[in-house]
Image (spheres, rainbow, N blue to C red):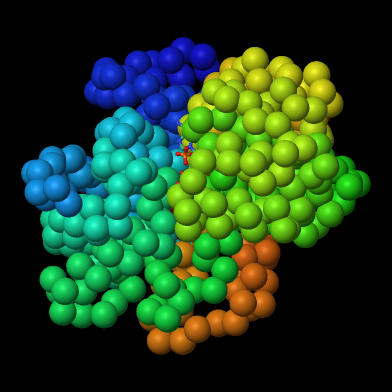
């Protein structure tokens, strides 16, 4: 088996040189899916995984725009249209200086499995730009978004490819891009998700990824006779996913000790309650400030420049910032401190070594493609509401989100059985693979 896996990885690596993040995501899937394929007659010999790792289409384009000072700026835009076997391409846009093809291909590849797990008819895509919105004025962000969409518009559409937000792309950026798409096409369609509530957005979309990850963790805990109530929780990040993961953990009785940004983390031993979280939300979403400012408001808390929060003892860890933010040494700290469960809010936040430590230690470990699927699931519900020209209530969307997260947990449970318990990585990979592979087989060699 090891030889088959290595041969496969070598073939993929030879075609994708200098794409470490993409190869990391592929390796993680291959380790569990190849043994499954070999054991199943219908999939063996069809080269389905080899087809899945090759994007259906990659678009790369120049984004030239004029900033506030009159200077001409140039960025690079991308859209990776990865797989459309079960629906139109669907996945977020990321604006961050470290965006490159390797990062977007890893995200688009993970999206194949994640979108399949939601049970909704969505294919997989991902896109973005190396544009950095941090510290830019609203005018600069708008001009960039308009220029970016001027090119992207010809490649997307409500039945073709429906982008959403991701790192650096929140409601402000979605608004500017939607406005430009509408201007170019002269049509009002649900071409983007994460829209504002008065112009086609869905209730609970902003909350969905963070809430979903906590629902998933609660599901895992319930299977071992535990709940979130009374548990200490360490959260990384302070953006969209982190804010609502913290909010739901607090509502369910957890004690949230930390939040972070790319500069460092804050540790509040008394716990971040809803009032303190509201301060962080205002700081990040409106003032666009830094997490270190928290200790000016709450001086009993401490700030740790340039560090991640994984050494803080906790029972639940929720990484919600970015890829490879939780390394093997961090996993060892969490295990030593008797952490019970890790639920990934971010995409691929744990590196290869960390995942193996979690699996070996039998900690409850939920990979992002399962535990953070709530965001894209509610995006799917936003698309459904746009098609119906109708809006569901907050309670209705939240209930649907809960059902979807329960179903994802159940799929992982079914496919992740091992002698010593549930392997959620294996469960998520195989459950996602089966759905997409069946559709690809039915559609012939494409
Ligand atoms: P935001 O841009 O709202 O927040 C990102 C957070 O992560 C910020 O606190 C940011 O800090 C921090 N961060 C970004 N880059 C780094 C870095 N290199 N090192 C340390 N911290 C960093 O993004 P989201 O909350 O939307 O996304 C967070 C993660 O969740 C990503 O992995 C994304 O792919 C994933 N995700 C998001 C979904 C969604 O619905 N939004 C859905 C599913 C997954 P700073 O402000 O300093 O940059």
Does residue 51 appear in this view? no
Residue shown at the point (71%, 44%) measured from the top left: 298
Q: Is residue 35 above or below residue 127?
A: above
Q: Can residue 72 be seen by looking at this rendering?
A: yes
Q: Percent from the top left, x then y, of residue 36? A: 55, 33
Residue found at x 67% / y 53%: 277
Furthest residue toward top: 3
**On screen, residue 207 above or below 356:** below
- Residue depicted at x 51% and y 51%: 284
**Residue 366 occupies which quadrant of the picture?**
top right
425 or 35: nearer the viewer: 425
**Residue 26 appears in which quarter of the rendering?**
top left
Residue 209 point in image, percent of width and height:
57, 55
Left or right: 248 as drawn, with respect to 355: right
Indicate the position of residue 282 as horizontal and vertical percent values. 55, 57
Give above or below for 423 relative to 307. Answer: below
Q: Is residue 341 left or right of residue 5?
A: right
The one nearer the camera, 393 or 298, is 298
Residue 246 percent coordinates (x, y): 68, 50
Q: Residue at x 31, y 41 (%)?
A: 132
Total marks drawn? 0
């Amino acid at each position: 088996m090891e030889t088959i896996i290595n041969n496969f990885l070598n073939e993929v690596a030879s075609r994708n040189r200098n794409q470490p993040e993409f190869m990391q995501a592929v390796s993680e899937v291959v380790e569990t899916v190849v043994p499954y394929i070999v054991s199943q007659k219908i999939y063996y010999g069809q080269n389905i995984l080899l087809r899945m790792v090759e994007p259906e289409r990659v678009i790369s384009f120049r984004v030239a725009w004029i900033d506030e000072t009159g200077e001409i700026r140039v960025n690079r835009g991308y859209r990776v249209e990865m797989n459309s076997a079960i629906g139109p391409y669907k996945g977020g846009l990321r604006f961050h200086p470290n965006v490159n093809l390797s990062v977007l291909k890893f995200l688009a590849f993970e999206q194949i499995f994640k979108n399949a797990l939601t049970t909704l008819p969505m294919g997989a895509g991902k896109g973005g730009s190396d544009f950095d919105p941090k510290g830019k004025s609203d005018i600069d962000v708008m001009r960039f978004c308009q220029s970016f969409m001027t090119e992207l518009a010809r490649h997307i559409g409500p039945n073709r490819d429906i982008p959403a937000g991701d790192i650096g792309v929140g409601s402000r950026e979605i608004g500017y891009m939607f406005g430009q798409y509408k201007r170019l096409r002269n049509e009002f369609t649900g071409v983007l998700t994460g829209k504002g509530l008065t112009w086609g957005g869905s209730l609970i979309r902003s909350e969905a990824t963070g809430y979903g990850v906590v629902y998933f963790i609660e599901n895992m805990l319930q299977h071992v006779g535990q709940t979130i109530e009374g548990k200490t929780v360490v959260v990384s990040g302070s953006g969209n996913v982190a804010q609502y993961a913290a909010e739901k953990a607090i509502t369910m009785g957890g004690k949230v000790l930390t939040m972070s940004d790319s500069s460092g983390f804050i540790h509040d031993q008394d716990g971040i309650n809803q009032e303190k979280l509201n301060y962080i939300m205002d700081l990040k979403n409106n003032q666009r400030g830094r997490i270190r400012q928290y200790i000016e408001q709450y001086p009993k808390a401490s700030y740790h420049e340039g560090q991640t929060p994984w050494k803080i003892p906790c029972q639940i860890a929720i990484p919600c910032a970015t890829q490879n933010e939780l390394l093997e040494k961090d996993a060892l700290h969490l295990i030593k401190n008797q952490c019970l469960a890790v639920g990934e809010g971010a995409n691929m936040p744990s590196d290869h070594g960390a995942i193996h430590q979690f699996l070996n230690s039998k900690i409850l470990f939920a990979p992002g493609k399962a535990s953070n699927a709530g965001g894209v699931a509610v995006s799917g519900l936003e698309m459904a509401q746009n098609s119906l020209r109708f809006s569901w209530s907050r309670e209705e969307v939240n209930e649907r989100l809960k059902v979807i997260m329960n179903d994802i947990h159940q799929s992982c449970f079914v496919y992740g059985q091992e002698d010593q318990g549930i392997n959620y990585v294996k469960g998520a990979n195989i459950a996602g693979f089966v759905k997409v592979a069946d559709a690809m087989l039915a559609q012939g060699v494409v």
